[in-house]
Amino acid sequence: MKKLDISNWTIKQDLSNLEYMNESETVFAQANGYFGIRGTIEEGYSNEIEGTFINGFYDTEDIIYGESAYGYAKERQTQLLVPNTKNIKLFIDDEELNIEYSKLENHFRELNLKNGIITRNLTWKTNKNKILEISFERFVSMDYENLMIINLSIKPLNFSGKIKIISGIKEDKVKSLDENDPRVSGQLKYSLKNYDFFKKDDCIVTKSKTYNSNLQLITSVINKSDNIKVKNIKVEGKNIFEEFCIDLKQNIESTVTKYCFYYFEKKSKIEVEEKLDLFKELTSKDFRYYKSLQEKYYEEFWNISDIILEGNKEIQAAIRFNIFHLIQSVGKNGKTNIAAKGLTGDGYEGHYFWDTETYVIPHFIYTNPDIAKKLLSYRYSILHKAKKRAEELSFKGALFPWRTINGEESSAYYPAGTAQIHINADIMYSLKKYYEVTDDLDFMINKGLEMLVETSRFYADYSDYIDGRGYCINGVTGPDEYSALVNNNTYTNMMIRYQIKFLMDFIGNLKIENIQLYNEIMKKFKITNEELILFNDIYEKIYIHYDKEKNLIGQDDSFLNQKMWDFENTPKEKYPLLLNYHPMIIYKHQVIKQADLVLSMMLIPEYFTDEEKKANFDYYENVTTHDSSLSECIHGIIANELGYEEMSVNFFENTVKTDLYDLHNNVKNGVHIASMAGSWQCIVFGFLGMREIDGVLNFKPNLPRKYKKIELKLRFKGRIIGIILTEDQLIYSLIEGESIEIVSNGEKIILI
Ligand code: BGC
């Protein structure tokens, strides 16, 4: 079966076939960072997995442990399904339009990546042989974060008469997709409470509240059409609908515009009237007005964010699709972040992970640094909770949560959760990159530095000085979740070393460049000289496990001494291993879920010699299952650097196609945001070989023969730099800003 018809800027689906619906509901999801909807159809159907999500709108419940221990995460946080506003039902002579039973022809929908609009067309022949052409156009506004807008056009071809429309606000129920898959969301016992339904002028409204997190939500819709005569309100359970008829004239198109509005606040009382006035004002403009704004937004977005890759049309479209989902799902208000599944599904409960800093932020730093800043601001907004968490665990400083929405740790399985203390260093790594790429000293002074000092304090206190070894970081889990609670995960130790150097350099430079500010900072954060000496000592003496006999760097102290996993006798259906083997079996073997040491090679290339990169990549790649979608992109980048062309292309293409081609068989639960961003990294850090080292952009391009051309733009220190790479040409151009020096294949170039 041909699932989707994918071309340069559009994704088209033939809706006469319902086999791929749940997957396509994710592919066709629309969002603006504040809220998002799954790509279900307006009239609904029996097997749909519905979902409307608001970024950061969640509730909590106690985690029930059979056997608890001190310091375990206490509460689950789960992103809630909020009321559904996209529903619209159509009736002719009491016969309902239904995708499963109606006689429909030419039923297609198309997502246009150029503007984020989905258009769906169909021809409906009723049992009484009335024929209508119907089209729906909808989008979630990028300019007005609270607004979604749907335009319905109806044209009767062989009759004039009435059509009944029911359109309103309805409750969706969570469908648990696979209870045995820990990556899928669990359900909370309760959803929203204190439902209040009413009509206020043209608005139909529901007001609701979460049970524990104290969030208040207003959902409202207004149906508008020139033709509506009478509207009746119907309340059924937690659903409120408007029912109305319009008079259709043969061969004339009638339209209904549905405006949908979401707003939430953490407050005991929400100013409903005020918010509805705001909404009503939004509805004074028509669909065309918002559509043109949306087009403009995306035109500006693509102008900087597009990547042209010639040589494979499928890959070209998939890259755009991935970049499109990043801008759709990313929180842009400094109070929210980007969930592992974006706003496209309830997988991973809507939690934010290190996926943001390690995978997503680089894309934004080099294309939309303001968004990167907002994501880092979110981390700053939860710093006080990270400090409390460190204290709870009896350490100084701050420990950011492994997975969270509200800033508290929400990981119930601590070996693959809290124990991943590399989260602090991941965030600090992206802070360093953000700072070096934007020179945003203000952000560093007002937000970044405090995070940097506090997370470094945590590491200093956590580390143990062991004679003969140095500073050890024991009992932690690195990125590879198929090893847990190990000593000296090299990735973690290297990242800590790197962040501590960043802190010392930053403070050191401040002392030289602005002694007054330096004194203020030292006082404000109570940094003593003894503390600086300790940081320096850790930087110099943090332990890295080299296995001299095997001539390898250990992933941790014990990995290389474990038994090798029996890859030969593990059938395909036993992957991912996490769904088929007890952790104790997995943990005691040499088997890796995702890039770990290989990730350090990409993030901190200066810590490795070329020989070390090759020897360790060859070894570790061989024992990696890539069971996590965070893995292949990183391997693709290093494979390209090492000249393993075919391997690098394979990893790259698997990464790019993960969601659009459902390579992990779970796209119905939501997209894989990290690997979507990873596909951008494969191109920029992989094929262009870009690394930012000490404030200078270095390129070492290596275009696989399969592709003919890469063309893209990057923002760097207030400039826009254009890059074109073909089989025989490499062109850098300065599109905007003052001249700047870059390094290409080791050679300094000044762009003017
Ligand atoms: C990966 C983590 C990741 C999480 C959310 C897990 O499967 O192992 O590294 O943060 O998924 O994407």
Image (cartoon, rainbow, N blue to C red):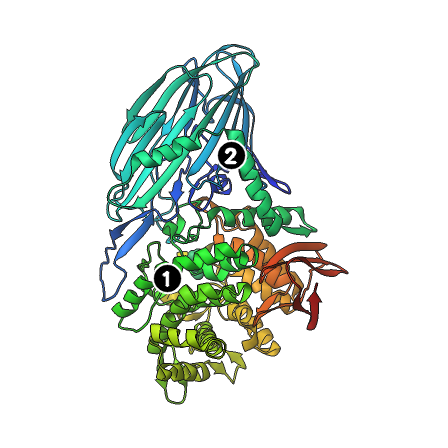
x and y, in percent, of residue 147 in the image: 43, 37
Q: Amino acid at mark 2?
A: Tyr
Near mark 1 (Cα within 10 A), the count class, few <14, some 14-19 or many ≥20, is many
Figure check: 727 above or below 543: above
Q: Amino acid at mark 1?
A: Trp
* Residue 435 showing in the rendered view: yes
x and y, in percent, of residue 303 in the image: 62, 48
x and y, in percent, of residue 490 in the image: 46, 75
The answer to whether the beta carbon of the residue marked 2 is less than 8 Å from any atom of ligand 1 is: no
Locate residue 191 relative to residue 554 in the image: left or right.
left
* Residue 577 showing in the rendered view: no
Out of 512 and 529, give the one closest to the viewer: 512
Which sits earlier in the primary sequence, circle 2 or circle 1?
2
Q: Quadrant of the C terminus?
A: bottom right
Circle 2: element type: helix
The residue under the point 39% across, 47% down is 55
Near mark 2 (Cα within 10 A), the count class, few <14, some 14-19 or many ≥20, is many
Give the number of the mark in front: 2 or 1: 2
What residue is pinned by disc 2? 290
What residue is pinned by disc 1? 402
The residue under the point 42% across, 50% down is 333
Out of 633 and 548, give the one closest to the viewer: 633
The residue under the point 61% across, 78% down is 611
